[in-house]
Amino acid sequence: MTVAPTSFRERLAARQELIGSFVLELPTRATIECYALAGFDFLVLDLEHSSIDVGLLSTLIASCQATGVACLVRIEAGLTSSITRVLDMGPTGVMAPGIRAADQAAAVVSAARYHPAGRRGLAPIVRHELRGGPDVKEREALTVVVVQLEALDALPEAGAVASTSGVDVVFVGPYDLSQSVGHPGELDHPDVIAAGEELVQHVTPHAGLGVYLERPEQIRRWRAAGASFFTLRTDGRIFVDACRRTLREFRGA
């Protein structure tokens, strides 16, 4: 009898469709709880484009744990040295932006794994025991590693990056990809779509494929291409859309 995947990492490996969003402009407990009540599978707590500091990050991670929402922390590009500190706070995993080659992906994996698989620092953290015991291998087996490919010149390396042992998901950064293609912000430009399709061909045989989405119709194209890890907008964009819709509804009543 086949056992259904239960951990977030197992669900990723089974290519279950998982839907999340970015938290970067409204980093509060209430925001996390609203996402949880809405039924989102995961959140990306963003350190690259936000003012979130490590103290607030720890609180946000705890809020995700309390509400049962998986959370990934997107570190700043190139700062693999911060991964040990971030993972010691107990998130589901990390997302690393700006990856262009397999050796960079391997460096992220190494920073997220304990010896002998990697170089993650080991310390007796109470938080580890609160999460279900101090077993190092158990914690490591649950830790998700997502890497972002978001530049045209990284496409030739996409297959090697996706094949890197320990990489669970390759995430498409469409805004940076559109910028590198020469059409900044034009996510539906044919050249941007073509670059995304080329990326898909290299990634999906080896790792899960993730993508950021702005509009509902975009999910159909990426789902058909093999993506299963989706982030829908950001907290701020969702909030302003809801504000506009609410105001429209009441003014028209």
Image (tube, rainbow, N blue to C red):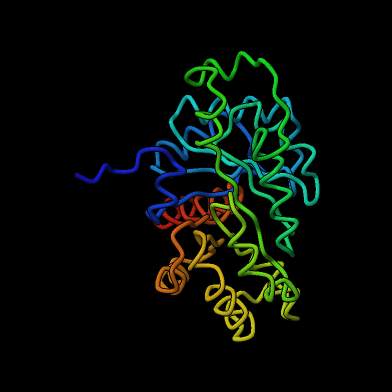
| Residue 6, picture quadrant | top left
**Residue 33: image location, x then y, percent:** 48, 32
Q: Nearer the viewer, residue 126 or 172?
A: 126
**Residue 166: image location, x then y, percent:** 58, 49
Q: Nearer the viewer, residue 249 or 212?
A: 212
Residue projecting furthest to the left: 1
Quadrant of the image containing the C terminus? bottom left
| Residue 179, picture quadrant | bottom right
**Which residue: 57% across, 52% down?**
240
Residue 157 position (above or below residue 90): below
**Residue 243: image location, x then y, percent:** 53, 49
Residue projecting furthest to the front: 116
**Which residue: 61% across, 31% down?**
28
Q: Nearer the viewer, residue 28 or 152?
A: 152
In the image: residue 195, left or right of residue 53: left
**Which residue: 64% across, 26% down?**
89
Residue 156 position (above or below residue 90): below
In the image: residue 222, left or right of residue 16: right
Q: Nearer the viewer, residue 93 or 180?
A: 93
**Which residue: 47% across, 19% down?**
132
How many marks on residues?
0
In the image: residue 41, left or right of residue 212: left
